[in-house]
Image (cartoon, rainbow, N blue to C red):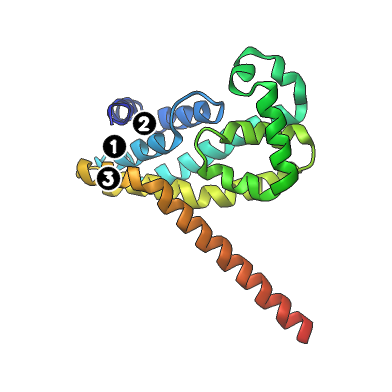
Amino acid sequence: MDLLERLITIFAENGYVAVFLALLLCGAGIPIPEDITLVAGGVIAGLGYANVHTMAAVTMVGVLVGDAGMFLLGHHYGVHMLQWKPIALLMPPRRYAKMQEKFQRYGNRLMFFARFLPGMRTAVYITAGATHRVTFVRFLMLDGLAALISVPFWVYLGYFGANRREWLSMWIRRGQSSLWVLGGVIVLSMLALWWYRRGRKSHS
């Protein structure tokens, strides 16, 4: 929790801008956990340094801008990015090849579920852009849908746990599995709705 406390201090002193910039760094692959960053943003709102709803909006934009930046870099520079030292450390050629294989196998689902896979997001988003198999609009829709699940979850968790750090620590540990369940429920609900509408159209 030391990192969380340090981020809380920085964000409390510098407000929304610091949270936004930290999320851009997360999107760029800097080893700052995105979930801890979002929780810290929620905590400072719970402590009265920010409005929690504004914080949720700011963090949503920060997450999407960071992700979109990696996608667009991959789309524009492609495999040439693998020669850049920071990218080469993050995603060596062998890992890039594995990501391409996963895209062939899982397609759009990989972009959605990458949001819930810490350590894989940046590599997935760069590869999504570099493959040129996904339009930017489709990427933004899938990533945005996943972010609508994860971002408010972490921000409001921090908000409600701002003065209950032991409770907050427990739920941070449980949070990733909780998000998987929530994401699965939403996906299944959307599929059920799609099948229902399809069935109604076929009988009309």
**Quarter holding residue 36:** top left
Q: Residues within 10 Å of mark 3 (few under 14, many from 20)?
A: few
Camera-near label (3 vs 1) is 3
Badge 2 vs badge 1, beta-carbon distance below 8 Å: yes
Give the residue at mark 3.
Answer: 170
What kind of residue is marked 2? Answer: Gly
Q: Residue at x 54, y 43 (%)?
A: 115
Q: Position of residue 28 (x, y in %)?
A: 56, 26
Secondary structure of the residue carrying tag 2 is helix
Give the residue at mark 1.
Answer: 49
Badge 2 or badge 1: first in the primary sequence: 2
Q: Position of residue 61 (x, y in %)?
A: 53, 40
Q: Residue at x 48, y 32 (%)?
A: 23
- Would residue 12 be found to the left or right of residue 17 on screen? left
- Would residue 74 be found to the left or right of residue 168 on screen? right
Badge 3 or badge 2: first in the primary sequence: 2
Q: Position of residue 8 (x, y in %)?
A: 30, 31
